[in-house]
Amino acid sequence: MPLIDVAYDVHPLSSYLNCLPFNFSPLYARKHLSFERLMYASELASLLPVYGRFKGAKQLPCFCFFNRLGEPILFDVLSHAFVSQNSHMALFASSGGGKSVLTGYMVNALMAMKNARIVLFEMGNSFDRLLVHCEHYGKKVSRMLLSKDKSKAVPLNPFCDAYLALPELGYCKDETALNQKAKALHKLTANLDQTALTDESLIAESRDYLSELALALRTMLTEANEGEEQAFTLADESLLLQVLSDAIVHSWEAGISQMLTEHLVAAFKRRIEVEESSRKKERLQDMHDRLLNYVLNPTKAAFFNVPTDPLNDFDIFHVDVSAMKDNKGQLALVMASLLPRILALAEATQDTERPTFLVIDEAHLQFDIEVIVALCLLIAKVARKLGLWLVPVTQNISDLSSARATKILSLLETWIVLGFNEQELTDLQRFKAITPEQEALLRSIDSQKGLYAEAVVLGSRYQGLFRVIPSRYLLALLMTEKQEKAARKTLEQEHGILKAAELMASQMENKATAHHQEDYFFDDDFV
């Protein structure tokens, strides 16, 4: 088959004659026909239908990894040269695949290279020593340990920013406008199982305060119970928004510094007194009684019916929600209270150059809760404007069985995958379309315990395999194996956390090697 069609050949007769046996003269062709030229091997490699070694984006130093030949692999998820739409990331791994180490390494790199602000939700305290490391080097660390103990309750008023919704109520002052808002909110929570074809349709110029407040109130009423959520109708959504709007305006006019749950209870009571429809009155009474529990129950009131201060600026904000991991209702309430406050901080600092990354460890638990997924979608709408990027992390992709996670996961442009088995690879394909080449790349992952962990990055512009080989000091801070933690604890009791990490790193760097004579090809007697 001819490489150049005769219709496009500049010298068709010459080509015919030159192709006859023994007629082609390389010297003549090079001098007069310009049919050939010297090329670099890299140019030839670009033309050939084969894959070379992945080297990342060498001009974008943020994360530094290595390929199998030890060459550095660099990429930066904040650069438009690396991503095309957004800087949201997903990090998935199998059990024992190195998820905690990679997450801690990436958090450390983002703070060091981009001066990023990090919000880290976790269950299990895997990163407590990394926080000590950050404090030692001058970073401002904020910790929040959530406990079921009333004496240790952290104020989490979901309505602390309620008055920011007053401008929205200017055009939602009539029932028709509120019904339209209710339809939009109902649609947001009803279509979570559908893939987002593009995030262009999920871009907003500003936050939707009223929707955030409505989601928090709805969570308090349903406590993330699946049956209650499914029974929550569009009519219920409209009633909820009407009462919420009344509570905000009434509290503002009364000069109350911060709207609390008790003010919403009073708004429900006012609405019940004037409601004429028996069906609506019955539904309002049910909502009122559920919400009243957050005022009368001392434990719940200590969390959700006390004024809450806005988040102060920080370098890393660590939230340990281990106490709530077995209770979906409590976890949903905590996330519904904290996420708007994090969003408020990102909004207040949007004019600075610092990006904010919201890292959610064990994300399969949060993304199984409808209200959390809906709030994350609201965050995704204003992500570009506020520079707030989602990073869900999990080693249990098979537990992402809820269809609710489909839309939010489909919006994440960059995926980083550590070793998967066949079942996990099948589960991954439910959320992301994978080409045969990418599937082969994922199957080729081969990690060596104690040496390196291999991973694959799947982005819109770059994809390839790399090895995670963090500094031994950072590895000592993040190790999670039982024997390793026991050895580290022994050193910590004598030397302290950071010095113990240095000693552990030194031991890993200078491992004693035993020489076995029988391993050699010959011995002295043979010579």
Image (cartoon, helix red, strand yellow):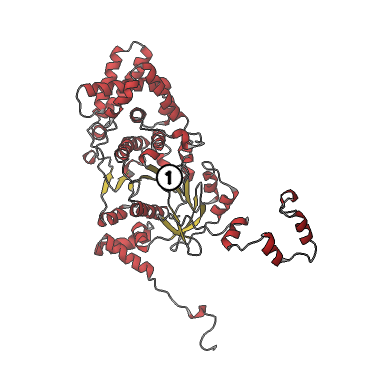
The residue positioned farthest toward the top in the image shown: 276
Which of the two residues, 46 or 312, is positioned nearer the viewer here?
46
User: In the rendered image, which residue does mark 1 sit on?
Assistant: 87
Residue drawn at x 52%, y 59% as measured from the top left: 446
Residue 217 lies in quadrant: top left
**Residue 5: where, in percent of width, then height?**
73, 50
Residue drawn at x 76%, y 61% as measured from the top left: 18
Whether residue 286 is visible to the viewer of this picture, yes or no, is no
The reply, left or right, for residue 243 in relation to residue 380 is left
Whether residue 431 is visible to the viewer of this picture, yes or no, is yes
Count of labels in the image: 1
Amino acid on which the number 1 mark rests in the picture: Ser
The reply, left or right, for residue 252 in relation to residue 46 is left
Viewport quadrant of the C terminus: bottom right
Residue 292 vertical position relative to residue 409 in the rendered view, above or below: above
Helix, strand or loop status at disc 1: loop
Residue 77 vertical position relative to residue 302 in the rendered view, above or below: below
**Residue 429: where, in percent of width, then height?**
54, 44
The residue positioned farthest toward the front in the image shown: 32
**Residue 69: where, in percent of width, then height?**
50, 64
Residue 253 vertical position relative to residue 100 in the rendered view, above or below: above
Q: Residues within 10 Å of mark 1 (few under 14, many from 20)?
A: many
Residue 189 lies in quadrant: top left
Which of the two residues, 521 or 10, is positioned nearer the viewer here?
10
Residue drawn at x 29%, y 39% as measured from the top left: 345
Which of the two residues, 246 or 420, is positioned nearer the viewer here?
246
**Residue 70: where, in percent of width, then height?**
48, 64
